[in-house]
Image (cartoon, grey):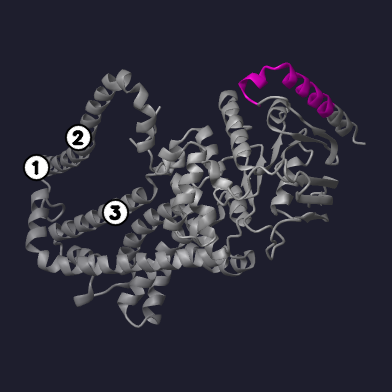
Amino acid sequence: MTDILEAAPNTAETAPERTVVSMRNVSKLFSNGTLALKDMSLDVRRGEFLSLLGPSGCGKSTALRIIAGLGAASSGSIDWPSSRINAKGLPEGDVGFVFQEPTLMPWASVFDNVYLPLRLNGMSKSGARPRIMEALASVGLSDFEKSYPRELSGGMKMRVSIARALVTKPRLLLMDEPFAALDEITRQKLNDDVLRLWRETGITVIFVTHSVFESAFLSNRIVVMRARPGQVCADLAIETTGERDANYRTSEEYRATTDRVSRALQEAIMLGAQGQ
Amino acid sequence: MTDAVQTSNMSEAGTDSAVAIAVARTGTVEKILRIVIPFIMVALAIGLWQLHITVNEVPRYIMPAPGDVIAALYTDWGTLSPSLLVTLRITFLALGIALVGGVGLAIILVQSKWIELAIFPFAVILQVTPMIAIAPLLIIYMPDTQSALLTCAFVVAFFPILSNMVAGLKSVDHNLLNLFELYGANRWQTLLYLKLPASLPYFAAGLRIGGGLSLIAAVVAEFAAGSAGKGAGLAFRLLESGYRLNYPRLYAALILLMVTGVAIFAATSLIAWLLLHRWHESAMKREN
């Protein structure tokens, strides 16, 4: 389970400044006239756990989708300095995406759902099997390969979705409010698991959330965004002295961090309300 | 029920065992009742039929007794069975062509809204025109009666399959479409792995409607178009028996049609169940 991304061990220390993706002055105007993003620039460094935090309508999900190549930016550019680019201008097999809903195919077993990205790449089922089982093991679902999505709980479906995103061994994992619909206990469990996967694989994560507590617990960098128009408003580095575990959740350090993040978010919300 | 549920219930197995046995017993009783009740009801209806004939002394040339019909089924089998085969052939051929045509055309229609705009009017016109009104025309234009009947049955069965499939192919979860786009799926892969499986519930609905309609259409078309001699289907036997006041045979032909209809319904329901029972709500028992 540790070597799901053996190609990229945690390189955060060795090459901290290597940029995975960089957005330059990206704007997005929807056809209904809403300016979802205005001049957003962001460099995501390798190995980062970056949270995009902001009120609804701040364009954080839009930014994530533009990075994933779902819907083009109206202006500005997205660069992938260290990836091979395919014909569509997207990094080849380098991005995994976890949607807000599990987005599983209900007619397919857990195994076939995780197989999908590899199948679309033309990999045979038997050839893909070890990687699929590895991805399922990494989210603790080895015993459920034959189950169908409807037989799983909400948290388990989300795990399948994460396994599917990891099965291509991407360098960048994009998560769009993945746990927003889950109960608090399941959510904490999945937060722990995502952190573990991040630590073990050295994958770069961009995590969209509207929860101060979630972002403060998970990330080592929080980008706070404001609405009307969607813009970056604060860029906070989050350092911790110890492990981020159950103890961290109740620590003074965590409380101080959530205070700092809350204040930044409050400011962003005020700016958005004033529409300046 | 399923592997997953069994595994997750392992830890509570001890506490739930008593309940499980009770559930299993009611399950068996229910299973038996499920089969027995429909049969009892049909037998009851036949009994009432016989009672009506005996009590009211209905003459045989008005309405035959159940026994007469069974006897006719046996003695006239030589006449009825070739006709049954003709009707079956038209029904299934029409349904088969309607399935291939309906699914195929639906796939073409959803490729672009312009194609849909161009072709859909014809599909609608074919559907809303009473088939019985065009049957005499088809007799003139088609080389023989059989192909005219086949065309009628096809036209009727085709539209429900087409419109269901169009709805199905269009109602794919947008997030799944995004996912396929994200992983660089081409059109063919999106169709094969996403759109077709996603429209299976709609296909099943179209199949059940189309299956029933193709039999009805095959019979109605024969009434309208008329046929005779060797190639005559059950509809012709119905008319012929009526003219001859051979009511037991008429009833026997009617019963053959009913049995065929029920068999088609059962077969299409079974296919729908096989396609959907693992994942779709429509084929699932509700548990609370």
Element carrying mark 2: helix
The majority secondary structure of the magenta stretch comes to helix
1 or 2: tag closer to the N-terminus: 2
Q: Chain of mark 2?
A: B
- In the shown orientation, is residue B115 left or right of residue A18? left
Q: Answer whether residue B188 is visible to the viewer in this image.
A: yes
Task: Residue B32: give its label.
Answer: 2
* Nearer to us in this view, A85 or A57: A85
Q: Position of residue A190 (x, y in %)?
A: 58, 31
1 or 3: tag closer to the N-terminus: 1
> Magenta includes B73?
no
Q: Position of residue B232 (x, y in %)?
A: 23, 72
The three-letter code of the residue at mark 3 reads: Ala
Element carrying mark 1: helix
Can marks 1 and 2 be said to lie on one chain?
yes
* Nearer to us in this view, A224 or B244: A224
Q: What's the distance in space between the residues labelled 1 and 3, CA to CA?
A: 37 Å
Q: Position of residue A98 (x, y in %)?
A: 61, 43
* Nearer to us in this view, B15 or B175: B15
The residue that mark 1 highlights is B54
- In the shown orientation, is residue B143 left or right of residue A257? left
Image point (18%, 56%), residue name: B251
The three-letter code of the residue at mark 1 reads: Thr
Stretch of the chain drawn in magenta? A244-266
Q: Position of residue A69 (x, y in %)?
A: 70, 54
* Whether residue A90 is situated above or below residue A179 in the rendered picture: below
The three-letter code of the residue at mark 2 reads: Ile
The residue that mark 3 highlights is B267
Q: What's the distance in space between the residues labelled 1 and 2, CA to CA?
A: 33 Å
